[in-house]
Image (spheres, grey):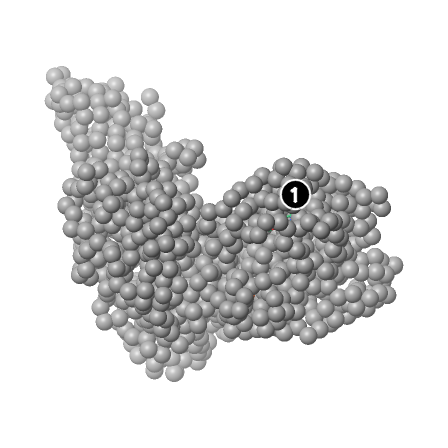
Amino acid sequence: MTPFAFDRAGDLPAALRAGGAPGARFLAGGTNLVDLMKYGVEAPRRLVDLGPLDGLRRVEETPDGGLRIGALVTNADCAAHPLVMERAPLLASAILHGATPQLRNMATTGGNLLQRTRCYYFYDTATACNKRAPGTGCPAREGVNRIHAILGHSEHCIATHPSDMCVALAALEAVVEVEGPGGARRIPMADFHRLPDDAPERDTTLAHGEVITAVAIPPDRFGSHHTYLKLRDRLSYAFALVSVAVGVGMEGTAIREARIALGGVAHKPWRREEAEAAMRGLAPEAAGERAAAILLEGARGFSHNAFKIELARRAIGRAVRQAASGTPQHHANKVIL
Amino acid sequence: MLTERHVGRPRSRVDGPLKVTGRAKYAADYATNGLLHAVVVTAPIAKGRIARMDTARAEAVPGVLRVFTHENRPRTAWFDRSWQDQVGPPGSPFRPLYDDRVHFALQPAALVVAEEFEVARHAAGLVGMECEAETPETDLKRAMTEAYVPPKRRSGIAPPPKPRGDEAKAFAAAPVRLREQYGIATEFHNAMEPHATTVIWKDGELIIHDKTQGAQNSQDWVCSIFGLAKSKVRVVSPFVGGAFGSGLRPGPQLFLAVMAALSLERSVKLVLHRDHHFGLMHRPETFVTVGLGATPEGKLCSVQVEAVAATSRFEDHQEVVVNWPGLLYDVENAAFDYRLAQLDTHTPSDMRAPGAPLGMFAAESALDELAAKIGICPMELRLLNHADEDRNDGKNFTSKELRAAYQVAADRFGWRHRSPEPRSMREGQELIGWGMATGVWEAQTVKMSASILLRADGTAEVRCGTADIGTGTYTILSQIAAEELGLPLPAVNTLLNDSAYPAAQVEGGSWTAASAGTAVQLCARSLKEKLLKAARGITNSPLASATMEEVRFTGGRIVLARDPSHAVTLAACFRELGEEKIEVEETATPGLLSKMRYSSYAHAAVFAEVRVDEELGQVRVTRVVNAVAAGRILNPKTARSQILGGVVFGIGQALHEEGIPDHALGRWMNHNMAEYHLPVNADVPAVEVIFVEERDALTSPIGVKGLGEIGIVGTAAAIANAIHHATGKRLRGLPMTLDKVLPR
Ligand SMILES: Cc1cc2nc3c(=O)[nH]c(=O)nc-3n(C[C@H](O)[C@H](O)[C@H](O)COP(=O)(O)OP(=O)(O)OC[C@H]3O[C@@H](n4cnc5c(N)ncnc54)[C@H](O)[C@@H]3O)c2cc1C
Ligand code: SF4
């Protein structure tokens, strides 16, 4: 671990000034960044602790009936917030499917968005990795890739984005609110994370020195017709092999409107508007099949992860059925509904 | 006054309050003025040599005292013999910083010592290494082609039994035949407490706090390597935060910390990084092939077990893998073969019930396959072939209540309601499967000494060199001493794992309760002789002519059993002796005669229920019943915890645990606790533990067989068999992760 300077941001402008310096990084819960520093994967020269910015620790209603969740709201507080439970239960469920209570007590909305891949090679500085050390290669392609991407990967990187929360945010069409040296920006979830293409070192479209201030969530359209379904290597406390976030609007027994995103399969939450359009008017069973076919178009696995394609196909079908019947998967219920 | 009965009663751990309040000190918890901190730097390759070491940048960091490498390490013993320990296998033990060779991934290659931990850690990141890499081999499938029978047997490990009958012929002639290969992935111990050593240096004398299952083993090793007199080295490790076998052999942290302390003439602490453990001790990946020949009724005609287990290039680590089915089942024709294949890894080490869960996963899965093939109840098949004597060794069993264990476990589980067809039980979208398997582990005893110091005020101290690695040894030894001497439990203080205490073997092999327990009982009995003699000698003694058989020790007094009004207090005995305290030391030695004539094993019957999502392949273990026959149970509460822990271990082995290697790099890639999966609470169901009454007067004088390991044996097989029953899918490779269970 390399020595570093430590700033506690007094207010947002001060944080922006300090965070804009070369080699500076923002610190929120630290559950990812500090680990990466200990492993020598990240070596910031300066940490700017966002902790004192209480203004970013609020969950509030927006005038249109949606929600704004401050970047420093912890995952635990977010999932337990009455407004979130009422207006965005899909988000609460996805968060509660992730990590452990201890981690969720520290992890924040902003940090969760920016958490880095769990690719083994990325964490191990004795190995090559294009994401950590651009140009060195991607040993995962030929190596241990059971947890890696089946969609949207490139010859340079096949890593996945590990977050559960972000999968729900994608399905909810959330917008990431950002302040930077150049002013404020609003980035739709679909544009926030990137595919690896030839620059896997860049996970997101956030620029250096920009601070996430909040995530805005549109008004609830799905009521109880949503679910977050996560499949993993043990029944709790493991990253998703495949996860599915779905929200549907029903008209009788048919789907009127749908939003669906996959986790654990790509460098970003995987969403295709075509899939959602194709689900319209169909019964859940057929809608699931159509959605799976479109979402998994072009899916390609590697030596150890090809099973994810079939797993994702089935998980989509199951999740759509759960959502359509208004029976969301509860994180504490290990029986898959 | 109440009679104090302790043995056989459920008692909470006597060390529990210390542990839950944080007052129990583990190896890394000790500190002293001027303590230095050491951090290991590992080699970036798995095989080859370190061509150049660049330590200048690290040494330039203020606060760094020294960076030790193979180039500048102090001279130590280099003969293999000097590096051997109580339990190591044949071969040439790994010597940290010995030369420029890299033998395995995450091999310690340098040690940075600094005034502060953070400084040492930072400097460690500045140590540069240029390496010449060679191609490592970590793929057992490939290395297997060069498997060999270990030329030198590891002492204390039963070799494969001699063949009997004509297995090949019997197999060929058998009406029903089955031959399958089963594989078990590499596992890592991952005890809660990391491997750590704190060396307190004072004028050339060392007090060492080491994470070890045997303080005396660590002491001998340090003295032998560094050429020190035993009087200069004391190892004190009263608390060990789990070890599961990883603390049996002295670890590199011990060598490195002592080396640094001696060279720098300062106290030094070294805690291995969690990741570094993944370079060291592990349960070896093993392939086991089982061939079974049987009659259409299910009587076994032949058993063949062949295993190939991984070892390192420098030592032949050996375990008992293939022997078990020939021992458990009555079969005329049997053949066994156990081979090793070398990989570029550290030497494997014993991990909870070394060998047994591997061989038994294979054998008990094969039996289940046979039962399905024949169409007979898996438990029936086992009862039909139950061995009443040990045909591997031609001996009788000291006791074997396995039949009773099957029965009681089956009853509790409700086994008779099982519908035999796979995929025939379900609830909602889950298929339900019920499986069972047998567990077995040898009940060993070893030579151990202990002492008891009894004071006139009726308090006592029990001392023994062996360790309590979380198993409950403190508690049961206190119980035995208190019961024998008629004292309340809190009056007895047990002290363990100090090289200055009476000589004892490492804590392992499930032998500690029987061996140390017997030594403590011998001490108590010898104290009682002395006390009764004193009581008889008192003028006008009410016990003047009493014999040991006629008296009881209770409530701090010796009383005549037939007339408790005749009594002498212990205090009076001490007055008569003119002493404030008396201390005795006794040694328990395994009964050689009984060993020659009898075999002794603990047995278990494990029944498991799984629920498998039919579409998605998610497995939930929802019930486990484990009935154990292991002789006398000294403390049902701590005993139950041992079995629970074993079952959890078995669940992990069945479904989760796996070191995932990148064979091109020769490196375990999931070398941390986030990615190496152990079962968590959600994975562990209600586990019912039943102890079957088993009287055994031959294994140890206190009737005990030992419990630390039996709980894991058979569990993975029971779960695999349950998954087959649920899904119709036979999985022959552990762990059975979702991708393997997922229906095609
Ligand atoms: C063992 C383990 C298991 C886990 N399991 C799961 C799981 O199952 N599912 C899951 O979804 N997650 C899981 N996590 C990940 C966890 O959710 C993330 O570590 C956490 O969300 C990160 O949030 P943080 O506030 O701690 O971020 P930090 O570690 O503080 O920061 C992470 C990154 O975000 C940047 N950052 C933080 N806040 C801002 C901001 N407001 N503006 C700009 N940049 C910012 C930091 O500079 C840093 O680069 C797990 C983590 C661990 C360690
Ligand atoms: S998949 Fe991406 S993160 Fe993993 S090794 Fe390849 S480049 Fe690095």
Which of the 4 image quadrants contains residue B35?
top left
Asked if disc 1 is less than 8 Å from ligand 1, the answer is: yes
Name which residue lies at 76% across and 41% down.
Answer: A60
Relative to B167, residue B50 above or below:
above
Residue B421, position as x, y percentages in the image: 58, 68
Residue A107, position as x, y percentages in the image: 60, 46
Relative to A290, residue B471 above or below:
above
Which of the 4 image quadrants contains residue B241?
top left
Q: Is residue B269 left or right of residue A322?
A: left
In-front residue for pair B444/A6: A6
In-front residue for pair B107/A103: B107
Residue pushed farthest right? A251
Residue holding disc 1: A72
Callout 1: few (<14), some (14-19), or many (20+) C-alpha neighbours within 10 Å?
many
Q: Is residue B378 visible?
A: no
- Pinpoint the chain carrying mark 1: A
Name which residue lies at 17% across and 61% down.
Answer: B79
Residue B605, position as x, y percentages in the image: 44, 56
User: What is the three-letter code of the residue carrying label 1?
Assistant: Leu
Q: Is residue A269 visible?
A: yes
- Secondary structure, mark 1, is loop
